[in-house]
Amino acid sequence: MSAIEHLAKALGDVLARLGEATQHLETARVTVQESRANLAVLDGTSDGEAQRALAQHGMVPDQVEQVQGLLDRCAEQVRTYGLSVGAISAPASRTRPRYPAAEPDSHARSVPPRPPRPGKTHGRWIDGDGNAVVLESGRGGEYYAATRTRAVNLGLARGIPHAEPAIARHVETQFVSRMIDQDLPHAEIEINRPVCGTTPKDRQWMETCHRQLPRFLPAGWTLTVKDGTSPTGRTYVGREVEE
């Protein structure tokens, strides 16, 4: 085995380990989301210990996202180095733009645009005018408040006053609120991670997009999420629910 082949193998191992770390972080993210609902009973408490516990727990999602951002940057640097020394092959050239705006119905999945902050779950939506709209998870989105209200109405706060269902921060559920606001019965988005609730590590959780999207969507409406797991993505159909 030549020196360059040894290097290629070593870089491949590094990228594989970084991928494994990303999967572990995704599991941690889902666990944090689920545990937040249990801690919501402490919201509004005057107990100092409880307030500190809530404050520390509230910082965890951002810390997870920061670590994910570091992993993403490390992987990018490894690939860049591998390309520069010929240990990693360059991707095949494309005959069309990286982010085609004029083909919203295409089944080919491209890399979603970079989010405003590294590490966040993010994606894109091609609107009716062919423009690529960046989607990002978190509390800062335009549709976060509406999504949180919807989640509470669906019982995901478990009857706890002032509780925040963690699923309200997700790209997919916030996009459903956009669909309702803009009267879009059928839509398709792309995201950079598998839909939560579809991997062996999070299938048992109830508060996931995979389980809850049919409840968030109005009856008969559809949302297709291309998450990299299949060429056509996952299509969720809204159904009647008792709120």
Image (cartoon, helix red, strand yellow):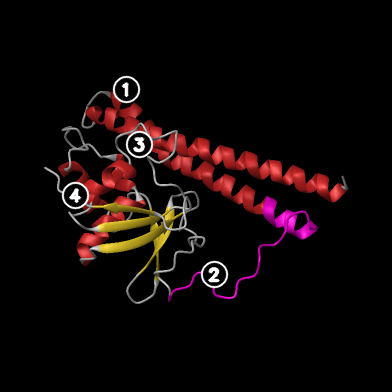
Image point (32%, 45%), residue name: 209
**Under tag 2, what secondary structure?**
loop
> Reading the chain from its start, which is encountered first: label 1 or label 4?
1
Residue corresponding to mark 1: 49
Dot 3: few (<14), some (14–19), or many (≥20) neighbours within 10 Å? many
Dot 2: few (<14), some (14–19), or many (≥20) neighbours within 10 Å? few
Q: Check if mark 2's residue and mark 1's residue have beta carbons within 8 Å.
A: no
Q: Position of residue 110 (x, y in %)?
A: 51, 62
Q: Position of residue 13 (x, y in %)?
A: 70, 41
Residue 178 found in image quarter: bottom left
Nearer to us of marks 2 and 1 is 2
> Reading the chain from its start, which is encountered first: label 1 or label 3?
3
Q: Is residue 97 magenta-colored?
A: yes
Image point (17%, 38%), residue name: 155
Image point (39%, 32%), residue name: 31
Q: Please, is residue 183 above or below residue 61 in the view?
A: below
Residue corresponding to mark 3: 33
Image point (52%, 60%), residue name: 111
Front in this rendered view, residue 159 or 70: 159
Residue corresponding to mark 2: 98
- Image check: 47 left or right of 133? left
Q: Check if mark 3's residue and mark 4's residue have beta carbons within 8 Å.
A: no
> Reading the chain from its start, which is encountered first: label 3 or label 4?
3
Gap between marks 2 and 4 measured at Cα: 36 Å
Quick one: quadrant of the N terminus?
Answer: top right
- Image check: 239 left or right of 134? left
Gap between marks 1 and 4 measured at Cα: 42 Å
**Under tag 4, what secondary structure?**
loop
Gap between marks 2 and 1 measured at Cα: 50 Å
**Under tag 1, what secondary structure?**
helix
Please give the range of residues in magenta.
78-102
Residue type beneath disc 1: Glu
